Image (tube, rainbow, N blue to C red):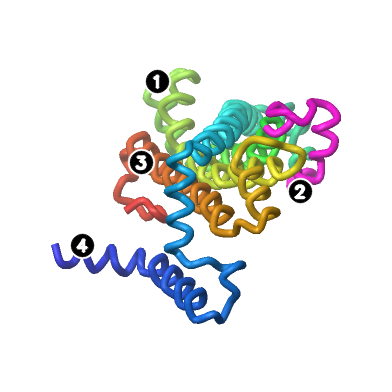
Amino acid sequence: MASAVLRAVARWYPVPLVLAVWEVLSRTGAVSKRLMPSLVEIAAAVGAAMDNGDLLFHAGISLGRAAAGYALAIVAGVLLGVAMARSRLFDALFEPLFSFGYPVPKIALYPVFIFAFGLGSLSKVMLIFLECLYPITVNAFYGMRGVDRVHVWAAENMGATPRQVFWRVLLPGAAPSIFAGLRVALPISLIVVIITEMIGESRGLGYYISYASASFEYATAFAGVAAVAVIGFTLDRLLVWLRNRVIFWERGAAFIGAA
């Protein structure tokens, strides 16, 4: 029991440490309370926003947009990555697009997406989809390519059909890399939705934070930031939980944040 407590403290101590430093800087006046309100003020702003329903409403809008783009990226990215790994034709067609396009910040294309899809949710969902597509596809591709050929040959020598080799050897072998891509893409979906909601939008946490900041209601703005952090942390924990259930044979392997 004591060792478990010590491990938890050793793992999570940066969080209370940062919060303590924040509170000290705010209360001592080292940083203006307008720019860095105390945690008590932020907690009060969270409570007020929860009571009137504003925070839940805007969080629901942002979460729905992020989930839609992320889900589309999962389907397209895994399928495309597997196809590129399994087919030289697909690899030749799409590999240059990913090589040249990966370093480009897709957020720079947001004006184009606005022109094509309008200022509503669709432009945001499509940009989230594009941003998340790259890490998911690349990880699925290298995961599939990285499967030990000895396992494939062993399955074939035992009489496995190509379909059985794919579902029972290749896909399970690539699953750790695929989940790594999903975990990389998850926070990207939240980052993109918050940024895009700050531009010409009247709903979502990005708008909520931007409007509160413009109104000099910094405690309210940080309440929105806290909501983003809680949502991101919760979704990451859920993904890690799912990963450990799906890839059960690696449950004891090292995976950052899986403990």
Whole-angstrom CA distance, mark 2 to mark 4, is 42 Å
Tell me the amino acid under the disc marked 1. Answer: Gly
Tell me the amino acid under the disc marked 2. Answer: Pro
Between label 1 and label 3, give the one nearer the viewer: 3
For disc 2, the marked residue is 105
For disc 3, the marked residue is 241
Give the quarter of the image for residue 8. Answer: bottom left
Tell me the amino acid under the disc marked 3. Answer: Trp
Name the residue rendered at 39%, 40% in the picture. 238
> From the image, which quarter does the N terminus lie in?
bottom left
Tell me the amino acid under the disc marked 4. Answer: Ala
Q: Secondary structure at mark 4?
A: helix
Whole-angstrom CA distance, mark 2 to mark 3, is 30 Å
Locate residue 30 relative to residue 167 in the image: left or right.
right
- Looking at marks 1 and 3 on the same chain, the residue that comes earlier in the sequence is marked by 1
For disc 1, the marked residue is 159
